[in-house]
Every structure is written in C-alpha cells, then in structure tokens.
Amino acid sequence: MHCQPSAIFKVYNWLKIKQTCLLCDERVDTAMPLCVECDAELPWLGPHCRVCALPLAVDGLTCGSCLKRPPPFSRVEAPWRYGFPVDALINGFKHQARWPIGRLLGDLLARHLAHAFDEGLPRPDLLLPVPLSPKRQRQRGFNQAQILAEVVSSALQLARRSDWLQRIGDPPAQQKLDAAARRRNLRGAFRLRPVAQPRGLHLALIDDVLTTGATAQQLARLLTRAGALRVDVYCLARTPAPGDH
Ligand SMILES: [Zn+2]
Ligand SMILES: [Zn+2]
C-alpha cells in the first residue's frame, strides 16, 4: 500500500511533539519516543552465533547448525532477542497497525546497524524487504518489513527495492509449524521478479523476526544463484533455540 508510509510519519511527527515514551508514557526529551530506562531494559541480544545470530552462551562462535549446514547468507544482524517487550511491540505493529511503534523499531534497528557499520560490517548496496503474500498484504494493509526498510533506508542513506522479490501462494501461518514443516512449506514460495538485477551486488534482506531462518535462507539462495556477491539479513529480533530463554 503506497499511501501508508507517509501517514505513518505524520503520526510519528505528531507524537514527537508530545515527546512521551511509547513504552511507559513518561515524558522524554530524547530524539526517539523511548526513555533511557525503557531503552536499557530492552532484551539486547548478548552473545550469539556470528553467522545466524542465534543466542549462545559465549560470543564469537558459530552455532552447530551453521557449522553443519552453512546458510546461504553471510550474517544476521539483530538488536534484540525475541522476548518481552519486543515481542509485544512487534505484534502491536504488525497486527494492530501501531505505526509509531513500527517507526520507533525501525529507528532502533537503524541505530544498531550504524554502530555495526562503524565496527566494520560492510554496508550493503541495497536493502530488500521480505515480501508478504498478496493475500496477507491485503488483509494487513501493509508489509511491516517494507516499512522497516523505508525507515532504515532513509536513516542510513541506503538504497532499497521492494519490487525484486515476490512471494507466491499463501502458505499457512508459519508460527504454527515446526522447522521441517516450515522448510517444506516455503519450497517454491518465493521468486525473483524479472526486474531484479542482483548480479555483483551486496544485498541485505529486511524482516521483523528471524525464527528458523528458513525464509531468509530461501531468499538468500535465490539471490546468490542469480549472482549476488553477498546477502546479509537485518531483523529486529532473533528467537533463541527452543527451550533456551
Ligand atoms: Zn519509558
Ligand atoms: Zn548460527
């Protein structure tokens, strides 16, 4: 929906004038509608796999599944582990169209990425939001990944394309499936549109949450087979391994 992003920024600007924290309603004088205390209490990722960002006990290692089956993407960047209150914020953004929250999450992702670029992470040539199926996009009225990509793109002066990747069909909701079922379910669920020109480029996929990584793997494989030099994944939150909280 092309009409919505500008509406989001209007709502956000209005909220900025009010300057209250979106989590606790305290008045703030920071650039973002988030107070210092709430910012500090977010579930920051901590030690994680250096490829897929899976939370681990020790930093700087590669997890067992990335060692056994190296994924087609080079690196996952995520500021948070998927837990309270980030899960509630993401759900409010996705399912109740709480756009000021989406804008805030996008700004915080951009802040995380700016720091990662300063630390040596190579900047991508292009951001590519993970597409929704046409049916889900109609139901929701917007694609949360596209809105995150717009916020990150304008904050960090990175180019983006929303018309390269296409989701075909309407797979059942991913949350209800286990990892193997997700992979089966996703087989053939995406394609590159004819306009896509990934050859020789460093690309970064943008999504809200990385759970099994099956979606990101399928898209990264499509892009590298079409000549992309490197594919990274930027998301808001990474889920821990099952049973690890
Ligand atoms: Zn607060
Ligand atoms: Zn890993």
Image (cartoon, rainbow, N blue to C red):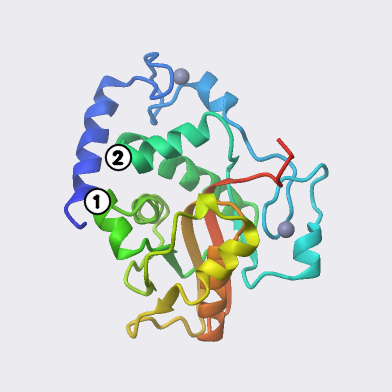
Q: Tell me: 221 left or right of 144.
A: right
Q: Secondary structure at mark 2?
A: loop
Residue 43 locus on image (x, y percent):
61, 32
User: How far is disc 1 from disc 2 in space, using C-alphas?
Assistant: 9 Å
Residue at image location 37% in from the left, 39% down from the top: 93
Q: Tell me: 220 left or right of 61.
A: left
Q: Amino acid at mark 2?
A: Ala
Q: Splitting the image into 4 quarters, where does residue 106 fall? A: top left
Q: Amino acid at mark 1?
A: Gly
Which residue is nearer to you in this view: 156 or 150?
Answer: 150
Q: Read off the residue under disc 1.
A: 141
Which image quarter is the N terminus in?
A: bottom left
Ligand 2 visible in quadrant: bottom right
Residue 103 in view in this figure: no
116 to 202, vertically: above or below: above
Q: Read off the residue under disc 2.
A: 97
Q: Secondary structure at mark 1?
A: loop
Residue 24 locus on image (x, y percent):
43, 17
118 to 46, vertically: above or below: below
Residue 26 locus on image (x, y percent):
40, 13
- Mark seen at residue 124: none
Q: Tell me: 61 left or right of 177.
A: right
Q: Is mark 2 within 8 Å of ligand 1?
A: no
Which residue is nearer to you in this view: 11 or 131?
Answer: 131
Residue 178 locus on image (x, y percent):
62, 55
Which residue is nearer to you in this view: 245 or 9?
Answer: 245
